[in-house]
Image (cartoon, rainbow, N blue to C red):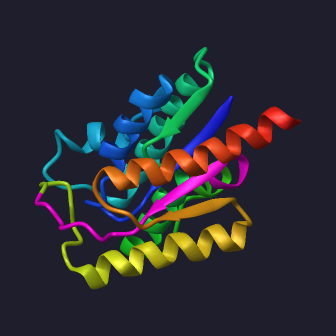
Amino acid sequence: MIKIAVIGPESSGKSTLCDMLNAHYKGFVVKEFAREYLNDKSSYEEEDLLEIAKGQASFEEEGINSDKNVILFDTNFLVLKVWSDLKYNRCHSFILDELNNRTYDLTLILLPNIPWQYDPLRESPSIEERMKIFNEYRNHLLLLNHPYKIIRDIGYGRTVESIQHIDEVITSKNRL
């Protein structure tokens, strides 16, 4: 099983990329629980992040327990940690534990180089905010020593670039 996390600032094309990669690999996409959870809420509080984290853990387990060879995660616990830190200046220990205990073969971090699109769940429309979030993700991945690749291309090139990186991981794992 190959586990690929796809992260990036809001409106960077994560869900679209996951769907495109899934069409290629015929794997399993672990959706973003926060989107489902917050869809019925007009606002959220810090306590909601713990519920989101628990739901995300459940979604991830469903993907890990699937019979698919490629599991694509349309977010991960690093996103929840950075979100919590930026919004509330702290992070619940459950989120930190999940971040430290879950591993991915590769994290694709999307550069926010496509136009921001309005969505009622999005909070960071400026490129400065989106780049700050991008840099937080990258810095944490470096600190955690997690393998990652920055996806810079746009359009279909983003999918091609991602497939190249994932295929490298698959080839490397098949050699073991």
Residue at the spot 25% in from the left edge and 80% down from the top edge? 127
Residue at the spot 21% in from the left edge and 79% down from the top edge? 126
- Dividing the picture into quadrants, the one containing residue 118 is bottom left
Q: Is residue 51 left or right of residue 94?
A: left
Across and down, in percent, residue 117 comes to 14, 61
With respect to residue 167, does 27 lie above or below?
A: above
- Dividing the picture into quadrants, the one containing residue 20 is top left
Q: Is residue 115 left or right of residue 63?
A: left
Q: Is residue 120 left or right of residue 24?
A: left
- Determine if residue 75 is in view: yes
Q: Nearer the viewer, residue 108 or 99?
A: 108
**What span is in magenta?**
99-118
Across and down, in percent, residue 22 comes to 43, 31
Q: How many marks?
A: 0
- Dividing the picture into quadrants, the one containing residue 158 is bottom left
Residue at the spot 29% in from the left edge and 85% down from the top edge? 128
Q: Is residue 7 left or right of residue 149?
A: left
- Is residue 117 found inside the magenta-colored segment of the image? yes
With respect to residue 95, does 170 lie above or below?
A: above
- Determine if residue 102 is in view: no
Where, quadrant-wise, is the C terminus in this rendering? top right
- Is residue 110 found inside the magenta-colored segment of the image? yes
Across and down, in percent, residue 40 comes to 16, 39
Q: Which residue reaches farthest right?
A: 176
With respect to residue 63, does 36 lie above or below?
A: below
Q: Tell me which secondary structure the magenta stretch mostly adopts.
A: loop
With respect to residue 40, does 124 lie above or below?
A: below
Across and down, in percent, residue 141 comes to 63, 67
Q: Nearer the viewer, residue 102 or 96?
A: 102
